[in-house]
Image (cartoon, grey):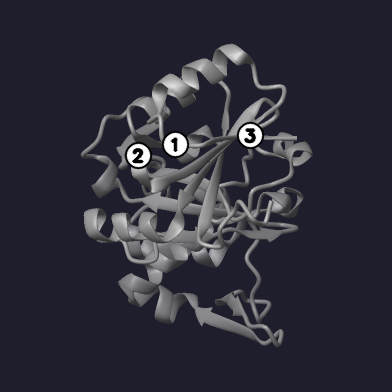
Amino acid sequence: MKDVVGKKSIFRIRPSNDLTIDELKKEYLWFSKPTEYKDQEDANIIAFLEANENVKDAFNRVFSNYKDLGKSIEKLGICCFTEDLPVIDKWKCFPKGHNGIAVEYDKARLEKYFLDKYYMGNCFSKVEYLDYPIKLLSSTNDGYDILWDVDENKNYFYESIRGSIERNNKKMEEFLIKLLTRINIRYQIQKENRIILSQRIVAKFLSGTKGYQIPIPIDLMLNIYIKKSTPPKFIKSLREAIPSSMPIIMLS
């Protein structure tokens, strides 16, 4: 496997169905709305704020009403990737991955595309896996700051809610991204990275009730991986949907 997968790659586990064929044939990435996640602790801004009173108060001061902000966040688009190509028996740990395929993308070129097209530098946000993702840690019982980062030496760094977060637009934006990338530790096998598009960006694209179709060039894909159990009918549709030069690799 190490000979096949380059270090600059990133992957998407997709179901073997017509929606995946449509995504590949029409050359887009599917960005889900946060409301489509079954896990109520995942990307649920209102749940985060109601579990952290001081953060909720800060958001009320900045955005007038935290529930209005929650409704606005529900219109964002989130596309999920995994850092490594998982072994086949772990595909079932991904949403609809039990009968899925894996699509390999050139990560560096994908990052450049989102920078050039949507002015998004470092578009990938790494997911953090926690025992209690909606509860934010503080250095005090009053909860006026939150844990912001932990370095390789286990040094803890905190940011003030009423200071740097509430008063700095960039820091507030970073904080919102943090809230959208905190997941329960039981999903850590997914090694997930996310691209999160703002409402300003997704408003320009075809929207359904569940998400958005964001066009990308087909040549940003490197390989497609399938299983021996992948239905021949789906493989035929897959081959018809992608360029003839695109490798389809069967894993055992």
Residue 246's label in the rendered image is 1
The picture quadrant where one finds residue 209 is top left
The residue drawn where x is 29% and y is 46% is: 199
Residue 43 in view, yes or no: no
Residue 50's label in the rendered image is none
Rendered position, 54 above or below 13: below
Check disc 2: other Cα within 10 Å, few if <14, some if 14-19, many if 20+. Answer: some
Q: Which residue is mark 3?
A: 95
Q: Is residue 13 left or right of residue 154?
A: left
The residue drawn where x is 63% and y is 34% is: 95
Q: Nearer the viewer, residue 226 or 210?
A: 226
Amino acid type, residue under disc 1 in the picture = Met
Image quarter of the C terminus:
top right
Could you tell which of marks 3 and 1 lies nearer the N-terminus?
3
Instruction: Please tell me whether mark 2 sits on a helix, a strand or a loop.
Output: helix
Q: Is residue 187 left or right of residue 119?
A: right
Residue 218's label in the rendered image is 2
Q: Nearer the viewer, residue 45 or 18?
A: 18
Residue 168 in view, yes or no: yes
Q: Is residue 219 left or right of residue 137?
A: left
